Amino acid sequence: MIGIMVSVTVVKFLLMVYCRRFKNEIVRAYAQDHFFDVITNSVGLVAAVLAIRYLWWIDPVGAMMISLYTISTWARTVMENVRSLIGRTAPPDFISKLTYCIWNHHEDIQHIDTVRAYTFGSYYFVEIDIVLPQYTLLQKAHNIGETLQEKLEQLPVVERAFVHIDFEYTHRPEHKSNRV
């Protein structure tokens, strides 16, 4: 049993070292998970061996230590990620960059009605409302909107962009009905 636990812990340690070499956040999350396994397996194994050899109460103390470590690790992870999970608005400088990019995208854009960006995990969802001339052909309007969407989605921090095209901007941009 000790050999199996040591082998698993060594493999987890090697996987942790390997995964830390990548910049991808998902792979780095695997590295963090492997590190967690290395710590909990090591403490559990040491506590079990010491309890068998010396004092019986060392094993429950080790279990309590693992529990406290687990709670603190997960609480810290939640606190680090809660801001990106709740859909916070992007900083004003990022909104300004988006606005500049939109305004310079095509000469037919007459007005930028709305620019929104909010967190979606580590990235942003972007919502844009632009105004084109009233009699712009559908094909041209579609191409302007689609190429703008593609341009915005090329930005490294944008997960998805939504471009709405209109011919006027005096209406409310929200289409949500009042709920009772």
Image (cartoon, rainbow, N blue to C red):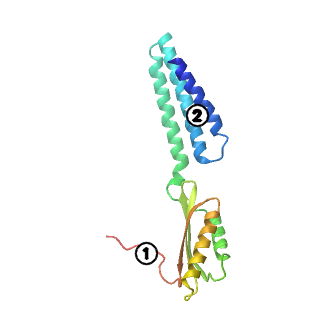
**In the image, is 23 to the left or to the right of 162?**
right
SS of the residue at dot 1?
Answer: loop
Q: Residues within 10 Å of mark 2 (few under 14, many from 20)?
A: some
User: Which residue reaches farthest bottom?
Assistant: 135
In the displayed structure, 104 sits above or below 158; it is below
The residue at the point 55 percent across, 59 percent down is 119
Q: Position of residue 8 (x, y in %)?
A: 55, 26
Q: Left of 168 or right of it: where is 178?
A: left
Q: Callout 1: 10 Å neighbours few (<14), some, many (20+)?
A: few
- State whether residue 95 appears in this view: no
Taking the spot 54% from the left edge, 54% from the top edge, the residue there is 121
Mark 1 = which residue?
Answer: 175
In this view, the residue in front, 106 or 65, is: 106
Say above or below: 11 vs 121.
above
Q: Which residue is mark 2?
A: 35
Residue 45 location (% of width, % of height): 52, 21
State the residue at coordinates (48%, 31%).
68
N-terminal-most mark, 2 or 1: 2
Q: Amino acid at mark 2?
A: Phe
Q: Quadrant of the C terminus?
A: bottom left
* Residue type highlighted by circle 1: His
Residue at the left extreme? 180
Is label 2 in a helix, a strand or a loop?
A: helix
Q: Is residue 47 above or below residue 179?
A: above
Q: Give the label on residue 83, or none.
A: none
Q: Position of residue 118 (x, y in %)?
A: 54, 62
